[in-house]
Amino acid sequence: MTARPRLTVVGTGYLGATHAVCMAELGYDVLGLDVDTAKVEALAAGTVPFFEPGLPELLRKNLDSGRLRFTTSYEQVGAFGDVHFVCVGTPQKKGENAADLRYVDAAVASLAPHLRPGALVVGKSTVPAGTAARLASELSLTAPEAELAWNPEFLREGFAVEDTLRPDRLVFGVRSVRAEALLRAAYEPVIDLPTPVVVTDFATAELVKVAANAFLATKISFINAMAEVCEVTGGDVTKLSEALSYDDRIGGRFLHAGLGFGGGCLPKDIRAFMARAGELGVDQALTFLREVDAINLRRRARMVDLAREELNGSFHGSRVAVLGAAFKPNSDDTRDSPALDVAAALHRQGATVTVYDPAAMANARRLRPELAYADSTLHAARDADLVLHLTEWQEFRQLDPAVLGSVVAHRRVLDGRNALDPQRWRDAGWTYRALGRP
Ligand code: NAD
């Protein structure tokens, strides 16, 4: 095998498009594939069909260099690649906690008949433990000269380019020395940084990803549980978490109380993890994740209750401005977004809700067409009886409460992210309330 294997990326969504672009940036020849023709055409024309800082520039640079191309043809992908990264979605099944594996199954099945002898298929999607072993035996029937590996992905939306070019670790789930060598060749510039590589069996590789997400979700729900206790004791969860954070056994990251987690990964990953544990007969080991999920969802309900209190018990006839629609800042991803969930709940209960987000307007409109949308914070807040801050974009942190105060009907703000400066807002005549604080 040459030192520089040729790479393909199957599924060019948030993960796959970033992976394809960054691997080309690292000097590899990369062919990306998606079944979504519009997405492939956009990427091939130099447009990233979602918001990710830094990615559009790198896409255009690497298209121009000729190292990066996109296609909808599995035949071309099979003929081109030595290493094929599978990055398709694994959403939650409708009405169930389990992951829907149909896209992963379809991607591997479509790829199999076109693989060249010796090709390595590398799963990057987040999957339940046991998936790689099953796919490997299926692949051994349809493409006996190809091999499978699992290489979970840890990138964060909003920092996806940096996380792909300089990840904090690589995990290779492999069954042969050759598969490990191919993966090392496919990541050579990253490994040389240096980046730690953990080589494991399939099950461990699959579990690392869901275990990491389970831990992060637990940390967020832990501090949000403390916020619930603060709310009835008069404590201030922001001071509590600051004090905890100085203990380096605990650390301050992911210890920020607020409206909780959402997005296309954490919620569905902890649910799929619980579902898989149930199938394996170890559901008790993960019962705590049910609480983690419940605490997280209770924060959304609490936000709605706080809003109702502020509006004297009823949403009818009231205008509410919602700042934020993405599940987190620096992303346009609205999958399972706490902000949109709260906005939709207020709308259902009779409020007139106007939403503004710096990047997620198109996705929000598609997901929640019943809500009203404005093209700026000031437009959203015009004549509002209540302003809700639900996604902590820098733009919202920097708002001038006096300027915003001049357009609203009532100076009332609920800070769902504990990110605004209470004193500044109160000094400008606002009633400021937040989760977990007096
Ligand atoms: P996404 O929905 O943005 O992208 C999935 C892509 O796969 C879509 O473009 C879709 O058209 C394509 N696809 C579906 N079926 C296909 C097929 N048969 N052949 C080719 N392409 C197909 O999802 P995403 O956020 O990129 O997540 C992908 C996987 O990566 C998931 O398992 C997710 O849990 C995992 N992951 C995501 C992130 C993240 O931050 N988004 C981080 C780490 C891991």
Image (cartoon, rainbow, N blue to C red):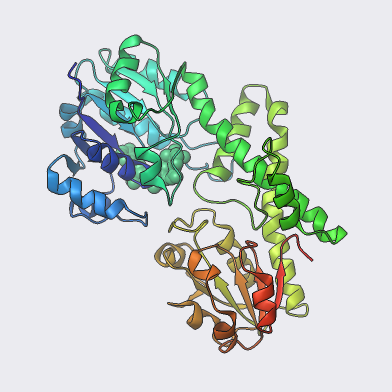
Residue 152: x and y in percent read 44, 30
Which residue is depicted at the point 59% across and 29% down? 276
In the image as oriented, which residue stretches furthest toward the right? 233
Q: Residue at x 29, y 41 (%)?
A: 22
Q: Position of residue 385 (x, y in %)?
A: 65, 83
Residue drawn at point x = 66 percent, y = 40 percent: 218
Is residue 287 something that shows in the picture?
yes
Tell whether 93 sits left or right of 57.
Answer: right
Q: Give the image quarter of residue 20.
A: top left
Compared across the picture, whether 109 is left or right of 278 comes to: left
Q: Quadrant of residue 120?
A: top left
Decide if residue 163 is on the left or right side of residue 211: left
Residue 362, percent across and down? 40, 66
Q: Quadrant of the N terminus?
A: top left
> Quadrant location of ligand 1?
top left
Q: How many marks?
A: 0
Name the spot of residue 11 as percent of width and height, x first: 32, 40
Q: In the depicted view, which residue is nearer to us: 370 or 66?
A: 66
Is any atom of residue 34 visible in this view? Answer: no
Above or below, 152 relative to 300: above
Quadrant of the frame with the C terminus: bottom right
